[in-house]
Amino acid sequence: MPEVLKAPLVVEFPFTRSLGPVQSAFLTGLRERVVLGVRTTDGRTLVPPVEYDPVTADELRDLVEVAPTGTVTTWAWNHEPRRAQPLTTPFAWVLVRLDGADTALLHALDAPGPDAVRTGMRVRVRWAAERTGAITDIACFEPYDGPPAEPGGHTGAFADPLTGIVAPARLDYTYSPGRAQSAYLAALGERRTVGERCPDCRKVYVPPRGACPTCGVATTEQVEVGPRGTVTTFCIVNIKAKNLDIEVPYVYAHIALDGADLALHGRIGGIPYDQVRMGLRVEPVWTPGTRHPDHYRPTGEPDAAYDTYKELL
């Protein structure tokens, strides 16, 4: 049995979203060193503000400024800050109910150690030196022993409000494919494609999962499939991905390899994008030094009959 593999993996993308009037005012306010909440129909002030009352579902638009000082309602100490967290030294995650608010805001508290943090302690906002209209415009909270700050009565109207934001999303983790997929990846290194057959229903799954998703039993019988296959369905990609050196438009397809009972996905090349079709017969194209096919190209065979792949759609 091949060695079970593991490797670091990063999933990262920029998340772009538009802002409604409430979130626009809140983030623009942070840029201007103003903290805004929203008042509900029963008189509560919610910070951070939301567009709809979580209790009644009423639409909320009554913005009200709250103070940049507040009280810690609960906390947890972070011994080892991670990449992109608010502070690079150990700090406390705190929920802070700002003066004038009825709910708490989650952020970081800069404190020398966990012994310096307690529920009920008074804190104030430490503003970032450069502010762009994001929650990071609050650099962190810091201990404060003065009187409550007085809000300025801002209404939430700004001359140059934000209309949208781009928030980076990133997930770092170590991926271990397990026994079945380790064998699958090892075979790809030899330019072979293998799946596993269910002992009950006899279906061959590619890539193998170690168990049959239908019968729920372990799969151990290895079966070599392909290398040729049939396009079962596809999409045309018109937006170029960052760091992917492929010109758009191009086609990404589900491909049922000969002998497999599950379609895998791959890029289709060697044919104009508008000529790709269901039933197209394809074969893998390998790039020297890689462990997987670069793309699939037409074989020149007649298209497969619909009845031969309809169960794999």
Image (cartoon, rainbow, N blue to C red):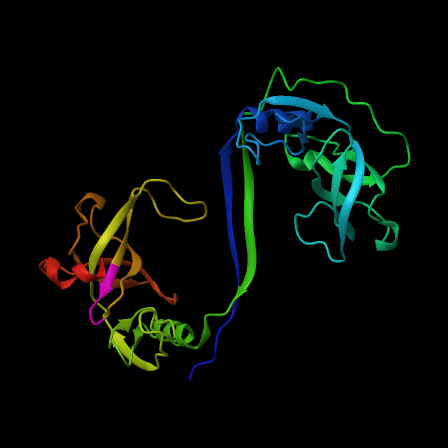
**Image spot of residue 197 (x, y percent):** 28, 77
Q: Report the label total.
A: 0
Q: Nearer the viewer, residue 173 or 287?
A: 173
Residue at the (75%, 37%) spot, across then down:
97
- Picture quadrant where residue 98 is located: top right
With respect to residue 194, does 48 lie above or below?
A: above
Q: Main secondary structure of the magenta part?
A: strand
Is there any visible trace of residue 34 in the rendered image?
Answer: no
Q: Is residue 229 left or right of residue 91?
A: left
127 inside magenta stretch = no
Q: Nearer the viewer, residue 7 or 85?
A: 85
- Picture quadrant where residue 225 is located: bottom left
With respect to residue 86, does 40 lie above or below?
A: above
Residue at the (72%, 31%) spot, across then down:
101
Q: Is residue 52 left or right of residue 152?
A: left
Q: Nearer the viewer, residue 149 or 6?
A: 149
Is there any visible trace of residue 284 in the rendered image?
Answer: yes
**Image spot of residue 155 (x, y percent):** 67, 17
- Picture quadrant where residue 184 is located: bottom left
The residue range painted magenta reads: 255-259
